[in-house]
Amino acid sequence: MAAKDLLAKCLYWRGLPLLVLGLALGLTLLYWLHERELDRQHLQFSFDVSQREASLRIEQSMAAYTHLLQGVQGFVQAAPQQATPRALQRYVDALPLGADFAGVQGVMRLEWLSHEQRGRAGLALRPEGQRSHYAAVTQIEPLVASNKGSLGLDLAADPRALRALELARDSGRIALSTRIDLAQLGLPSAPGFLMALPLYDGELVPASVQARREGLRGWVALPVRVHELMSGLYGELPAGLALSLHDGQGEDDADLLYRAGKASEALLAGQEYLLNGGQTWTLTVQAGREFAALKGATGANTVLATGAGFALLLAVLAWLLSTARDRAQTLAERMTGALRESEQRWAFALEGAGDGVWDWQLRGSMLSTSARWKSIMGMKPGQGEPNMSQMLACTHADDMPRLHSEIQRCLDGSATQLVSEYRVADGAGGWRWVLARGTVIERDGKGLPLRMIGTLSDISVRRESEERVRFMALHDPLTELANRAHFDERLHFALANARRYNESIGLILLDLDRFKPVNDQHGHAVGDQLLQAVARRIRNSVRETDTVGRIGGDEFVVLLTGPVTRDSAQVVADKIFNQVAAPLELGGLRVEITCSLGLALYPDDGIDELSLTKAADDAMYRNKRTGREAMSDARTGQDPSATRPGDLPGR
């Protein structure tokens, strides 16, 4: 009998600690998996932001290159006889080129040569029927001092550059070459590409490919060194982040354009395809452990080490409990105190991080929430616990269907976690953006949910920052009007809509008269205030459906959406002129300024962006020459030949 009791005690002493150890390690493992998922999500979010930022920087730089090349094209096509190499050099020297144009090695003007000029050009580019055309570089106007001078080059030996020229010729748009060695263009050897835009006879792009080939005069092109382009965008990459850029849809070393950074052990990798000028680039970003440590995504390892130690401690405590009742009772009391303290620390950590905690009992539809949760929801201190219906009543009506759907998916089991961003009433008449995370932790025998817990975070600041970033990407930072890229997009959409519904739209170009003397005399601060005041007056002179943009220092543009008549557009133009001409008080300084305007209507004065803009620009400069008095005489019939359709009041 004594031997059996001894055996039972031995099994009890050994089995209980092992059981406790196994349970504690199991709980630790579950919590570690949860923390690892949170770390992974945080790291994935930081990685996605870095990758998207990289692609956006490249796209913005390529957009700047495109605007530069379009400006050179406009300069050459506006007056082809006057666009001599010296004139082109002066034009390029006058451009405000800064860090946005890092990588541009020069501005090249290329021209088609006839069959008789083959000796100057070299090899044939491509036969066209019975004729052969040849391409040759007639002038290079570099942007950097190390490349000053004029070089005569023959591009016929580089098929990749020629394919870019052919693509630009046949499409009438910007075209990029595949990866080339810039030594082919007489520049220092480095990976790069050629960016080309065609020049045609006349100011409009011919409608068909055959017409474009027959009307081609040449190209304007930019040779770009990719390493300088990417270095100008990034400088030094964050630790643990590696970035590479390949030509085409692959990662062959032969197609490598740029590589920077180093990830010792790639935890995350992503690819994004960038389409520029008919060419596809593959942007590859990798993140290593250094990047994870930089972003603070290493909490799971700490949890695992802490949990394993805590499990071992519990096992020791269980062994001590099994050997001595008194000691076990004392240790149990200490352990209970430690658990309560640990729970308080976790609650404090969550509250300190700004997150509220909620516990939803589905059968009673009641919520148990923390003080921080009530604060985020705009509830008063000491207010009782709400039910789920009361909580949903505080949700913005536009977000309610989506929130209902996401909660239901989590309850049904089709989604393991609830992650939802929505707006709630802040208790002061406004709305606050929140992020709710949750998961079902208890179900009945039929799989129906019984309990759900989660956290609530206030993300209003982050959402406002994201909205501000989106706004600044499309608007001028000084006047908050549409920038050139955003205005071009709105104009393109308005023209497409007008063609579809056979409506008319109006385009007004405006620049301030004698703005530079005001800016020079009173300083840039007054000049900025003047531009902001003029922007407000222009915006107040048009409808909410119209678009006002700033496209230069003192140059503004207004898009009047249809239906628009010449008379109604004239009324708007007169209103703008009178508003701008009204005296201004800027910090105790009285300023008076006028403006020159030009109006063009679709389809009367132009059928596309280029022709419509040119018509408005011509009208504005005619007004600068004739003045407002000539326009007034033309309207009263004293001198009808003094103006043309589209002319508006000038200076």
Image (cartoon, grey):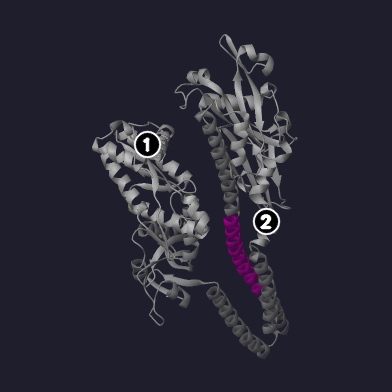
Q: Residue 42 lies in magenta, yes or no?
A: yes
Amino acid carrying mark 1 in the image = Leu
Amino acid carrying mark 2 in the image = Pro
Residue 439 visible here: no
Is residue 615 or residue 407 the one in the foreground? 615
Q: Residue 337 appears at what percent x and percent y?
A: 60, 85
Q: Secondary structure at mark 2?
A: loop
Left or right of 250: which side holds 213?
left
Magenta span: predominant SS is helix
Please report the bounds of the magenta region as a residue range: 18-46
The residue under the point 63% across, 86% down is 334
Please determine whether, in this image, residue 518 is positioned above or below residue 427. Answer: above
Q: Residue 254 lies in magenta, yes or no?
A: no
- Picture quadrant where residue 384 is located: bottom left
- Picture quadrant where residue 451 is located: bottom left
From the image, tell me which residue sits under label 2: 238
Q: Residue 96 appears at what percent x and percent y?
A: 59, 45
In the drawing, what numbered circle is on residue 190?
Answer: none
Q: Residue furthest top?
A: 130
Q: Residue 520 appears at what percent x and percent y?
A: 52, 54
